[in-house]
Amino acid sequence: MGKVCKEQNTKSWLSVIWQVCNVFMSLFFALATYVQINDPDAGLWMVGYGVPAVLCVLLALSPHVTETLPWRRVADLHVMVSSAVVAMLGLRLNKEQITEIFQQEEGREFSGLILTVVWLLMCRHSGRAPVGMLRVSTAVAITVFPFVAWLYYHLNKDLRSNWPSHCKTAI
């Protein structure tokens, strides 16, 4: 009886951590949506980050939402379109032999879309069964990364010196 209770307690904590990760990723995607306001093609990128923000909020509020048809269809469509754009951006980065991807707008766009695709794929079917340690550990690492990277780039002005003006003025 004690072992079963301990396993249930661990699973409930993993679920809470999973939901907290989704709250933070929703905040990150919402912030990423906001900073697109100055971008020349803001509408596309606001949708690109806004959709995952909403999907993450829904998941944080109701973990079983990933098993509903509307959530899955929107997530799948977003992953499909984002994957196509990632492939195009990746080919462009490769063709131009760009190695410092965060110094190029296409590289930042590529990285942001990769993050949305990976996150939505991790979320897929997470409401089907209790989330496990591997998914939660991966989620924590992925959740921390964009915040640390954003902070790092915003504290180091030299890294942003070649960025276009619309990338420097949102925040």
Image (cartoon, helix red, strand yellow):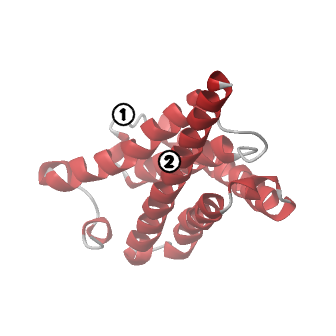
Residue 36 lies in quadrant = bottom left
Give the secondary structure at mark 1: loop
Q: Is residue 132 left or right of residue 129?
A: left
Residue 160 lies in quadrant = bottom left
Q: Residue at x 64, y 52 (%)?
A: 82
User: Is 146 situated above or below 134?
Assistant: below
Q: Is residue 2 left or right of residue 76?
A: left
Residue 77 location (% of width, % of height): 76, 57
- The residue lying toward the viewer, choosing from 98 and 24, is 24
Residue farthest top in this picture: 3
Mark 1 or mark 2, which is nearer to you? 2
Tell me which amino acid carries mark 1.
Answer: Thr
Report the quarter where the N terminus lies: top right
Residue 96 shows in the view: no
Q: Which residue is mark 1?
A: 99
Q: Residue at x 62, y 25 (%)?
A: 2
Give the secondary structure at mark 2: helix
The CA span between labels 1 and 2 is 13 Å
Q: Residue at x 49, y 53 (%)?
A: 20
Report the quarter where the C terminus lies: bottom left
Q: Which residue is mark 2?
A: 110
User: Is 45 situated above or below 106?
Assistant: below
User: Is 149 situated above or below 50?
Assistant: above
Residue 111 location (% of width, % of height): 47, 46
- The residue lying toward the viewer, choosing from 108 and 74, is 74
Mark number for residue 135? Answer: none
Residue 56 shows in the view: yes
- The residue lying toward the viewer, choosing from 97 and 124, is 124
Tell me which amino acid carries mark 2.
Answer: Phe
Residue farthest front in this picture: 1
